[in-house]
Image: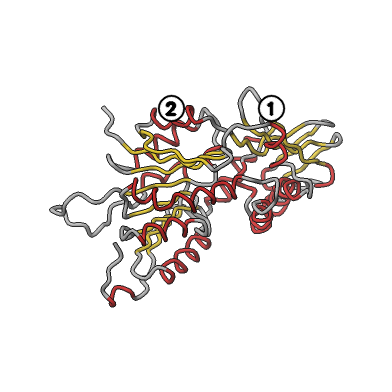
């Protein structure tokens, strides 16, 4: 637990490890656009939604009546935070895609009240966002040690500092840690890529650690589509904004008025697919890539998948990675689930 020693209540300076090489974001963007716009059908990964404008629009989306996942997840956290703390037995929380860590405070409060909060390990690809959040948290939770990691899910999960560097070899085994991925972010991974991600999570932990996962559940298709195609058109602005990102960062000449937003539910794959559909035949130039892209009238470009899950599927996918489900909580309507799985030894 956080030490009662008054000296320890002074705000600690967060430790931040940055594992992203200089120019990483530009290289990733160029590679993703080059490959995605050369593919058939064309696609862009959703991580490029989140410039300052995109983040602002997404914040608005989370407050829309149609967009239930944020409310449902918060409902579960507020109701079950104490149970999560007790079931995990953790004194270190590591959050993947931590962002501003705002929602995380519900869990930090519960772990602190239970006397089992010592460390918080936020993981994000924005150093500025991570650093600001870390500094706020050490002020809000005196004695809390924050060790942030700036990195990429595909390459740096193995660098999560769940063990403290200064821990002597003769020390007894550490308490369990709890890694968490909230917001149904797992839904943005295709079924083909989820096993590698979950294997990486398991590989970053040790036997006895836990993983808390947020998943949006399969439900009526009309409700799902409405959550990604709201009446106010905020999600449409959010989707189109990715073209502004490419225009600004790559010198592209996308005409935002020549594309329209759409969201459809793919019943076979049980995911929502967001697209930008070209309203006319057009040619787009991307000078930074020395690339010209042809769009036919009516041609779609996929910008996001958001997979929806069934409880038995969640358990099976976690179990295949050596993460055995201990508890699963849903909101009162059964729209959303939080699953706590424990890392077991794998032969």
Nearer the N terminus, badge 2 or badge 1?
Answer: 1
Query: Furthest residue to the right?
Result: 280
Rendered location of residue 25, percent (x, y): 56, 51
Rendered location of residue 4, percent (x, y): 27, 71
Cβ atoms at labels 2 and 1 below 8 Å apart: no
Q: Is residue 127 left or right of residue 50?
A: left
Other-residue count near label 1 (Cα within 10 Å), few / some / many at <14 / 14–19 / ≥20: few
Nearer to us in this view, 78 or 91? 78
- Look at discs 2 and 1 and give the one toward the viewer: 2
Determine whether 266 is above or below 255 in the image: above
Other-residue count near label 2 (Cα within 10 Å), few / some / many at <14 / 14–19 / ≥20: some
Residue at point 72%, 47% (across, down): 235
Q: Is residue 216 left or right of residue 248?
A: left
Q: CA distance from mark 2 to mark 1?
A: 31 Å
Residue at the spot of label 2: 316
Rendered location of residue 315, percent (x, y): 43, 30
Q: Is residue 156 left or right of residue 39?
A: left
Determine whether 297 is above or below 163 in the image: above
Query: Furthest residue to the front?
Result: 332
Query: Furthest residue to the top?
Result: 268
Nearer to us in this view, 185 or 244? 185
Residue at the spot of label 1: 40
């Amino acid at each position: 637990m956080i030490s009662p020693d008054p000296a320890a209540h002074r705000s600690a300076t967060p430790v931040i490890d940055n594992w992203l090489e200089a120019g990483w974001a530009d290289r990733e963007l160029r590679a993703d656009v080059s490959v995605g716009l050369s593919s058939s059908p064309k696609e862009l990964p959703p991580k490029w939604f989140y410039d300052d404008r995109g983040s602002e629009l997404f914040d608005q989306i989370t407050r829309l009546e149609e967009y239930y996942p944020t409310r449902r997840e918060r409902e579960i956290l507020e109701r079950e935070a104490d149970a999560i703390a007790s079931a995990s037995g953790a004194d270190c929380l590591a959050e993947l895609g931590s962002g501003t860590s705002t929602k995380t405070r519900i869990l930090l409060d519960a772990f602190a009240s239970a006397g089992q909060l010592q460390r918080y390990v936020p993981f994000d690809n924005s150093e500025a966002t991570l650093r600001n959040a870390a500094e706020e948290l050490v002020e809000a939770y005196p004695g809390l040690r924050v060790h942030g990691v700036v990195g990429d899910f595909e390459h740096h999960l193995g660098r999560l500092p769940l063990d403290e560097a200064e821990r002597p070899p003769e020390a007894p085994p550490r308490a369990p840690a709890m890694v968490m991925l909230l917001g149904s972010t797992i839904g943005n991974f295709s079924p083909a890529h989820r096993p590698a991600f979950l294997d990486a999570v398991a590989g970053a932990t040790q036997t006895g650690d836990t993983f808390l996962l947020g998943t949006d559940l399969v439900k009526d298709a009309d409700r799902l589509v409405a959550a990604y195609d709201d009446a106010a058109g905020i999600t449409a602005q959010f989707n189109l904004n990715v073209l502004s990102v490419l225009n600004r960062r790559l010198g592209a000449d996308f005409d935002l008025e020549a594309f329209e937003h759409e969201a459809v539910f793919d019943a076979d794959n049980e995911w929502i697919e967001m697209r930008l559909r070209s309203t006319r035949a057009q040619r787009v130039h991307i000078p930074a890539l020395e690339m010209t892209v042809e769009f036919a009238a009516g041609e779609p470009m996929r910008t996001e998948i958001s997979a929806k899950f069934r409880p038995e599927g969640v358990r099976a996918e976690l179990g295949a990675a050596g993460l055995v489900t201990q508890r699963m909580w849903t909101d009162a309507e059964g729209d959303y689930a939080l699953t706590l799985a424990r890392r077991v030894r794998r032969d």
